[in-house]
Image (spheres, rainbow, N blue to C red):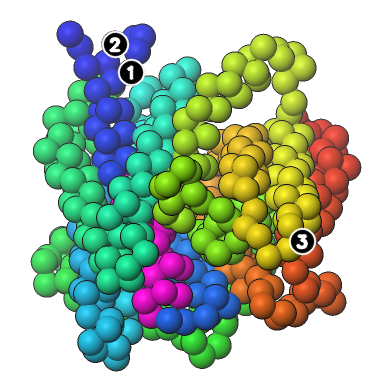
Amino acid sequence: MSQFPEKGHPKGLAVLFATEMWERFNYYGMRAVLVLFMTKALLVDKAFASNLYGSYTGLIYLTPLIGGFVADRFWGNKRSIITGGIIMAIGEFILFFCASLYSTDAGLANFLFYTGLGFMITGNGFFKPNISAMVGQLYPKGDRRIDPAYTIFYMGINTGGAIGPIVCGYLGDTGNPADFKWAFLAGGIAMLLSVLVQKLYQDKFLVDPEGKQLGNVPDDSPKATLKPVFILIGLTALAALMIGLLYIDATIFSFLSYLLIGAVLVIGGYIFSDKSLTGIEKKKVAVIFTVSFFVVFFWSAFEQAGASLTFFADSQTDRTLGSYTIPTSFFQSLNSIYVVGLAPLFAWLWLALKKNEPASPTKMAIGLALLALGYVWIAYGVQSAVPGKLVSMIWLIGMYGLHTSGELCLSPIGLSLVNKLAPAKFASLLMAVWFLANAAANKLAGVLSALYPENGKVTQFLGYQMTNLYDFFLLFVIMSGIASLLLFLITKRLQTIMKM
Ligand code: GLN
């Protein structure tokens, strides 16, 4: 049988599915215990853990810009994926050592903690953009199967995202802080499995419709960039830079948000001052910037999952089921479980609506509204709770269902929207803007999670005071609610430009 049936999908998709699944197992499994490890083993407070979570996940979305660039010019996708995967596995193993000796050598554990995270950031930068790019390359240009292929790939992401927190949580989030190390070890092993699958099958199955290997080193790549010494020095320097940036942003001066905003402004200025762009092209670019702005509100509220919502699951939620207490980290797999369950439903819904299927900006506004609704649900849950008693887990379970429905309206559209609207000349640069928006959103998620009010602590954001969890969740209702409303108001205008 040919590897490229006209119907069905090439076998390469199964390889990318498995590689990505194990990598996301590693990423989300580790993230499920990250703030718990910080607050229960490293004994930092919730605000510090939140800020560091934001710095870490913010940088995670920044390095793909570097990894994508290096792959295009020098290494090709395959080499970048393998290299990134190995660096991430090393990162997890460093965290394993950190979690093994935090009680005996706090100084060394602290150093290893930043080092491990810096390696995760560096490795992810080479892995994530390149594996995503390879999915589309398996098909002829414009093939109808590309969109479904990305949907299948998204299932791979979320299969890993569902299993990772459960396995890593089961092993590491036991109530004994000395066990966190097993979560990192499991993450590292999963990452090695990802690299192994990729290495074993990439040359045979990652081929284009003509059977030509994909993702190889570009023909015009300077030979020096492939020398092991060069690679080792380059990667060490990059990892050192990431460790330094993470450390500075989390402990000395929070510069990341300014850097990201600055980068977007510079790129915007550069593109809009280009004389060769037509008026219509500029309008389309403006749509990309507008939509990127709105997704910041979405992800910064959504990504509370790994921070404030984990604190909430840990200390305010009744997690007992009969005589069993569900580990806090398990709640982080709910989003992925919902994606696997709900994605087919949404796919069916859009098809069933036929001509009435909402346009992309409208879907995004609906996504933001569903996110706001999720926070309304949980805000109601904490308000109606009996003081001093833990709340039912139904509030978190319902909220994640609404959040995921929002994600399924908003997330799959983003990348294709950028692809469609960007003038060819600035395609990569505008993709960078999209990543920068995600990075900014994740950083902001950490900053907002640091406002988690507890034990009489009063926090405030832009003049809005929060004295309890109800006020805190209401902040996200207001934020995403207003963003949704504004986006609804301008959808007509955006749609007109998109059709130009
Ligand atoms: N959960 C998805 C992933 O990990 C999407 C996350 C995002 O785009 N912010 O790939």
Task: Give the answer, above or below, for where 41 lies relative to 335.
Answer: below
Image coordinates for residue 303, horizontal then vertical, percent: 57, 56
The residue shown at (52%, 42%) is: 335
The amino acid sitting under disc 1 is His
Q: Is mark 1 within 8 Å of ligand 1?
A: no
Q: Which region shows up in magenta?
A: 23-42
Residue 30 or 485: which is nearer the viewer?
30
Q: Secondary structure at mark 3?
A: helix
Outermost residue, front side = 323
Nearer-N-terminus badge (1/3): 1
**Disc nearest the viewer among 1 and 2:** 1
Q: Which residue is mark 3?
A: 470
Q: Quadrant of residue 93?
A: bottom left
Image coordinates for residue 452, horizontal then vertical, percent: 65, 71
Residue 487 or 312: which is nearer the viewer?
312
**Disc nearest the viewer among 1 and 3:** 3
Marks 1 and 2 close (CB-CB < 8 Å): yes
Image coordinates for residue 350, horizontal then vertical, percent: 65, 20
Query: Where residue 9 is drawn, which disc sits there?
Result: 1
Image coordinates for residue 90, horizontal then vertical, percent: 21, 65
The amino acid sitting under disc 3 is Tyr
Q: Quadrant of residue 17?
A: top left
The amino acid sitting under disc 2 is Pro
Q: Which residue is mark 2?
A: 5
C-alpha span from label 2 to label 3: 54 Å
Left or right of 32, for residue 382: right
Which quadrant would the C terminus be assigned to in this image?
A: top right
Left or right of 36, for residue 484: right
Q: Main secondary structure of the magenta part?
A: helix
